[in-house]
Image: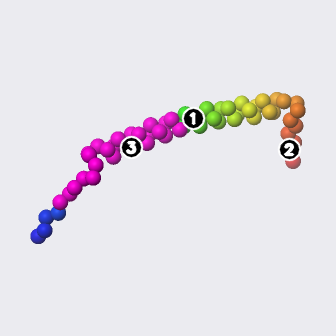
């Protein structure tokens, strides 16, 4: 019977490091999106309060 060899292409633990980096990236992305959404909501509120813009409901 032929013995099989395992050879790793990268050092152990890099997969876990990549998962941690992805989670950190995701947290930063969510924080950026929260800021962006908050700014958009503020712009919408200012537009609603501005008498120059008139919203009509059909």
Position of residue 8 relative to residue 20, above or below, is below
Q: Residue at x 60, y 34 (%)?
A: 34
Sequence-first disc among 2 and 3? 3
Q: Residue at x 49, y 36 (%)?
A: 27
Give the residue number, with chain letter if any, for mark 3: 19
Instruction: Kindly report the distance in space between the C-alpha atoms of the residues bearing marks 2 and 3.
Output: 47 Å
Q: Nearer the viewer, residue 35 or 14?
A: 14
Instruction: Kindly report the distance in space between the C-alpha atoms of the residues bearing marks 1 and 3.
Output: 20 Å
Q: Position of residue 40 (x, y in %)?
A: 69, 35
Q: Which residues are magenta?
A: 5-29
Q: Is residue 21 left or right of residue 49?
A: left
Number of the front mark, 2 or 3: 3
Say which quarter of the image contains residue 6: bottom left
Residue 45 is marked as: none
Instruction: Kindly report the distance in space between the C-alpha atoms of the residues bearing marks 2 and 1.
Output: 32 Å
Residue at the limit of the structure toward the front, as seen here: 9
Q: Assess whether mark 3 and mark 1 are in contact (beta carbons under 8 angstroms).
A: no
Say which quarter of the image contains residue 56: top right
Task: Determine if the magenta segment contains residue 50.
Answer: no
- Secondary structure of the residue carrying numbered label 2: loop
Sequence-first disc among 2 and 1? 1
Residue 57 is marked as: 2
Sequence-first disc among 1 and 3? 3
Give the residue number, with chain letter if any, for mark 1: 32
Q: Residue at x 81, y 33 (%)?
A: 48
Placement of the N terminus among the 4 image quadrants: bottom left
């Amino acid at each position: 019977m032929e013995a099989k060899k395992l050879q790793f292409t990268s050092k152990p633990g890099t997969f876990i490091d990549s998962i941690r980096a992805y989670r950190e990236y995701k947290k930063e992305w969510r924080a950026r999106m929260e800021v962006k959404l908050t700014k958009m909501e503020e712009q919408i509120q200012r537009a609603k309060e501005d008498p120059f813009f008139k919203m009509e409901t059909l």
